[in-house]
Image: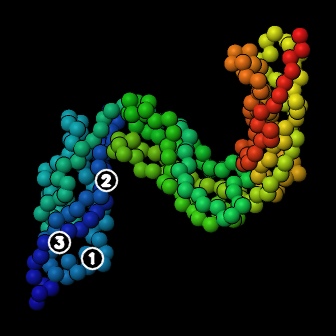
Amino acid sequence: MALNNKYIYTAKTVLVFKNTPTKRAFYPLQSDTVDLQVEGTGWQLLFSRLRIKPPSISVNLSQLNTKDFVVFSDQLYNVNKQVGSTQKVISVKPDTLYFDFTKRIVKKVPIMLVSKLEFFKQYGLASEVILSPKNVRVAGPMEELNKITFWPTDTLKISNIQSSSTVRIGLQHSIHKNVSIYPSSTEVKLSVDEFTEKTVEVPLKIVNNRNYNSIKLYPKKIKVTFLVALGSYAQVDANFITATVDVDEWKNLNHHQLAVKITEFPDYCKLINVNPSKVDFVVEK
């Protein structure tokens, strides 16, 4: 008997738009899912929790030819025709749907990986992280898209990493309802290897010797110690590293020694030590 009584319950349903304006481009400013306040029997209440009915309702957008919103209260009769005679929709939440009619453009921007990666001892990234796709298409008003230069991912959190892997990560949701992105995720390829220590001798280069003085350095080479992936150990040598000393330190700052600067270094090696860090020099007149 209780299940035969009338009750008011909520049923979520998806909106399907019809009679869209032909001369106005628009974008909905809310979700495409609404809550129907439905009056029905206890049996319908029971089954609504097992399976949402109706699965979708169509909404007439002809009002958008003259205004920027659609009111459900004006369409309850048509909504009830879709629901069926045994159920009665009392109201819809939200009752008003708002739309954006700003001119929309599409822009391609790079995806920026946001990550918190923790590696097992002596392991690390052996090469650049590869994103596929590496760009995202952003659609929205021009004034909003002018502010967007990249699109961040959700935070990729992995700990105790000691092997290469490929994972899929979602992109952060847009904080503006009138800005959308495609695709909504990207594939992240992590190339991981064990690192070991290596030391190479690198010849020093002199920069800013504008007067072309004859300058002798002592020593002429320095030792650079760094961590390198095992897979790249044989390939990475002194040719990948550039070490310089700046004559302006003597000419302008009157230094008696020149500081060594590493100006070129492999991205996925980890610098440990430069010895010596300063060198003596003699300027021959």
Mark 3, residue position = 9
Q: As rendered, which of 83 and 276 lies closer to the eye?
A: 276
Q: Residues within 10 Å of mark 2 (few under 14, many from 20)?
A: few
* Element type at mark 2: loop
Residue found 56% across the figure and 49% down from its top: 113
Residue found 84% across the figure and 38% down from its top: 222
Eyeballing the image, is 175 above or below 86? above
- Looking at the image, is mark 3 or mark 1 earlier in the sequence? 3
Mark 3 and mark 2: span between their CA atoms?
Answer: 20 Å
Amino acid at the residue labelled 3: Tyr
Residue 70 horizontal side relative to residue 111, left or right? left
- Residues at discs 2 and 1 in contact (Cβ within 8 Å): no
Mark 2 and mark 1: span between their CA atoms?
Answer: 21 Å
Amino acid at the residue labelled 1: Arg
Q: How crowded is mark 1: few (under 14 residues within 10 Å), some or many (20 or more)?
A: few
- Looking at the image, is mark 3 or mark 2 earlier in the sequence? 3
- Residues at discs 3 and 2 in contact (Cβ within 8 Å): no
Name the spot of residue 240 as percent of width and height, x first: 82, 39
Mark 1, residue position = 49
Q: Quadrant of residue 92?
A: bottom left
Name the spot of residue 38 as percent of width and height, x first: 16, 68
* Element type at mark 3: strand
Residue 31 numbered mark, or none: 2
Name the spot of residue 178 as percent of width and height, x first: 35, 41
Residue found 40% across the figure and 30% down from its top: 142
Mark 3 and mark 1: span between their CA atoms?
Answer: 10 Å
